[in-house]
Amino acid sequence: MDLRIDADDLNACVQCGLCLPHCPTYRVTGDEALSPRGRIHLMREVQDNAAPVTPEVVDAFDTCVQCRGCEPACPSGVPYGRLIESTRAVLADKGAVSTRRQRLAFWALSRPRILRLASSLLAIAARLRLVPKRLGVPTDLPLTRGQRHTSGDDVYLFTGCVMDVWQRDVHDAGQRVLEAAGVGVTPTGDLAPCCGALHTHAGLGGPARERAEATITALSTDDRPILVDSAGCGAAMKEYGHLLDTPEAEAFSARVYDIHEWLATRLV
């Protein structure tokens, strides 16, 4: 099966294993197949040697949380995030991952009013112990969320979808730090409700590109920096140039910074 992975990227892995301690699924299970090194080996076998895509192989790819914790630890600079995203996209096209139920949930991510309502209902259900424990839904999900406020136009603070619904307090804390540093902040809010990171992780390339294009359009009325306090969103938005392969996407990605990354250059 062609996983649409660049051969040079795939062969960059020298199987040294320095990524293993940084992989959460490997640390929990101790299973080599559930590590970056093991998954890359499986990618090679599937793409280069026509190995069968068994349920066990699908499970190895599907259980990756795509945190990219392995990338900073890799001495060869293997772009693992791109490898697993391409793999998941092919598997999604084949119907092996990303069920209809998951796709319905992703549909709600770009509709903030529906997402907020659904999250509040889920929070009530969790408090009433109506949600099965196996789903891992926290019992302290917020029922309501505080109002956002704009304090200036020096930077955008990207708030996103799930992060804004479940952890708006993190955005609020980040905004307070920025304002203490004398920075005027515009939370993006419903202007750009979803960056498409979760769609990319699920292998849903079409919807991911739609969300990327919508985000670029919404935040390109000026060229101020776009700060992100969610690692997943930031990683996805910095990859828009690769995802869309346009000069506009490349220019947009150059404006995206992790909040700490941007602040570090201004607090020295």
Image (cartoon, rainbow, N blue to C red):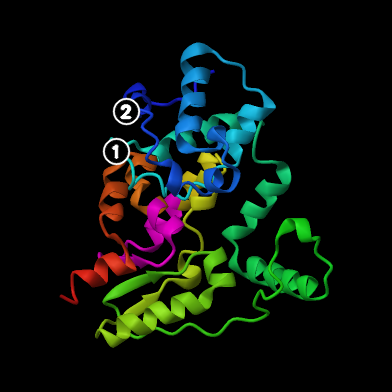
Q: Toward the viewer: 234 or 29? A: 29
Furthest toward the front, the residue is: 30
Determine whether 198 is above or below 177 in the image.
Answer: above
Callout 2–callout 1 Cβ contact below 8 Å: yes
Write the start and end of the magenta stretch as one range. Answer: 212-235
Q: Is residue 238 magenta?
A: no
Instruction: Give the class, few, some or many, for how many residues have Cα within 10 Å of label 2's Cα (few <14, many ≥20).
Output: some
Q: Toward the viewer: 66 or 19? A: 19
| Residue 166 relative to residue 169: left or right | right
Q: Quadrant of the C terminus?
A: bottom left
Dot 2 or dot 1, earlier in sequence: 2
The disc label shown at residue 77, or none: 1
Furthest toward the top, the residue is: 49
Q: How many marks?
A: 2
Asked whether residue 37 appears in the rendered view, the answer is yes
Could you tell me residue 64's position as x and y percent?
A: 55, 42
Q: Quadrant of the N terminus?
A: top right
- For the point 45% across and 33% down, the residue is 37
- The amino acid type found where label 1 is placed reads Gly
- For the point 60% across and 63% down, the residue is 111
- For the point 36% across and 32% down, the residue is 16
The disc label shown at residue 12, or none: 2
Question: For residue 100, which quarter of the picture?
Answer: top right
Question: For residue 254, which quarter of the picture?
Answer: bottom left
Could you tell me residue 53's position as x and y percent?
A: 62, 22
Determine whether 115 is above or below 101 in the image.
Answer: below
The disc label shown at residue 165, or none: none
Q: Secondary structure at mark 2?
A: loop
Distance from disc 2 to disc 1, alpha carbons, whole Å, reads 8 Å
| Residue 7 relative to residue 232: left or right | left
Asked whether residue 94 appears in the rendered view, the answer is no
- The amino acid type found where label 2 is placed reads Ala
